[in-house]
Image (cartoon, rainbow, N blue to C red):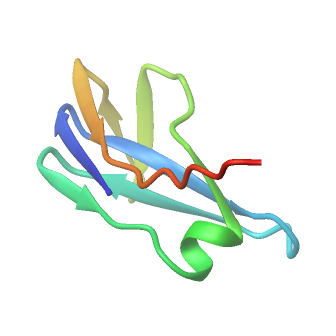
Amino acid sequence: LALSLGSACVMTFTHSQARREAALLLDPGSLLVLQGEARSDWKHAIPKRKTDAVGGRRIARGRRLSLTFRNVVLTHG
């Protein structure tokens, strides 16, 4: 679960087996929930750059904040 605040940006997804790529625009205030195949089979990242290409236009990046919440499973071995 991630909440994206501030500037818009593009998050890229790469499928670990099929070598497919996809991009998702995260507008300010976007809430992202990754579960199932999206969480287990796709790697996600926000590439470092000053602008993103979206729909044939360029969007400048500004300051942004991402709040990420994760479940952590602790095992004792």
Residue at the image position 23 percent from the left and 43 percent from the top? 4
Q: How many marks?
A: 0
Q: Is residue 62 above or below residue 5?
A: above
Residue 26 percent across, percent down from the top left: 30, 51
Judge left or right: residue 50 versus residue 45.
Answer: left
Residue 57 percent across, percent down from the top left: 36, 46
Residue at the image position 71 percent from the left and 71 percent from the top? 41
Looking at this view, name the residue that lies furthest to the front.
77
Q: Nearer the viewer, residue 8 or 58?
A: 8
Residue 75 percent across, percent down from the top left: 64, 52
Q: Nearer the viewer, residue 52 or 48?
A: 48
Q: Quadrant of residue 30?
A: bottom left
Q: Is residue 49 above or below residue 43?
A: above
Judge left or right: residue 11 versus residue 57.
Answer: right
Looking at this view, name the residue that lies furthest to the bottom.
36
Q: Quadrant of residue 33?
A: bottom left
Judge left or right: residue 3 versus residue 70.
Answer: left
Residue 40 percent across, percent down from the top left: 66, 70
Q: Is residue 13 above or below residue 60?
A: below
Q: Nearer the viewer, residue 32 or 28?
A: 32
Location of the N terminus by quadrant is bottom left
Residue at the image position 23 percent from the left and 27 percent from the top? 65
